[in-house]
Amino acid sequence: MLKSVLLHIFIFLLFSTNVLAQTQEIQIFDINQDMVIKHLPVSTDIQQEVEYILKGINGVYVKYNPIPNTGLMIRIPLEPTIMVRTQWFDDLVDEVTLIFTDQESPYLMVFDDENKPYFLTFKGDTIKLLTLLNFY
């Protein structure tokens, strides 16, 4: 009986650790292929670039369907979280998803504390971030 309980606790801890490790990595999702094509560790340089992008938020993405049919989505977890205060969004951000399409400038998606998505535009360049991600 004790072995069974210990085995279940061990399996639970193993899966819990695996889930935590997966959430702390950058994922590059190819919309065309409908799959994650690259996993990368988060670095302080990447975190700083994302912070720079978040400071450049300058509006709300206004198109009806914010998820494009083609392009890339890059999910970047943030540790520590970053406080974003703009007229369009005011909350802590623990992950950012950058959306790249061929037709328009990149924009981003963040979630508030109630898991409501916000699609926002930003001014600034993403070349340095893409270079850090070895994707430019």
Image: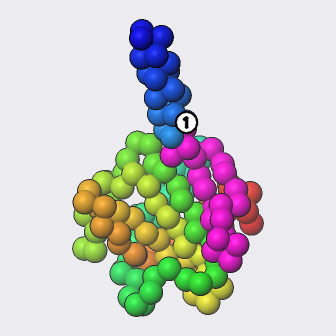
- Residue at mark 1: 18
| Disc 1 secondary structure class | helix
Furthest residue to the front? 1
Is residue 17 rendered to the left or right of residue 88?
A: right
The one of 1 and 33 positioned closer to us in this rendering: 1
Position of residue 96 measured from the top left corner of the image (x, y, whole percent): 46, 60
The residue located at (71%, 61%) in the rendering is: 37
Picture layout, residue 14 above or below residue 23: above
The one of 62 and 54 positioned closer to us in this rendering: 62
Stretch in magenta: 21-42
Residue 120: image quadrant is: bottom left
What's the amino acid at mark 1? Asn
Picture layout, residue 61 above or below residue 42: below
Position of residue 79 measured from the top left corner of the image (x, y, whole percent): 44, 43
Is residue 49 rendered to the left or right of residue 83?
A: right
Can residue 85 be seen? no
The residue located at (58%, 68%) in the rendering is: 73
The one of 65 and 41 positioned closer to us in this rendering: 65
Residue 86: image quadrant is: bottom left
Position of residue 28 measured from the top left corner of the image (x, y, whole percent): 63, 61
The residue located at (60%, 56%) in the rendering is: 27
Position of residue 100 measured from the top left corner of the image (x, y, whole percent): 60, 76
Q: Residues within 10 Å of mark 1 (few under 14, many from 20)?
A: few
The residue located at (25%, 60%) in the rendering is: 114
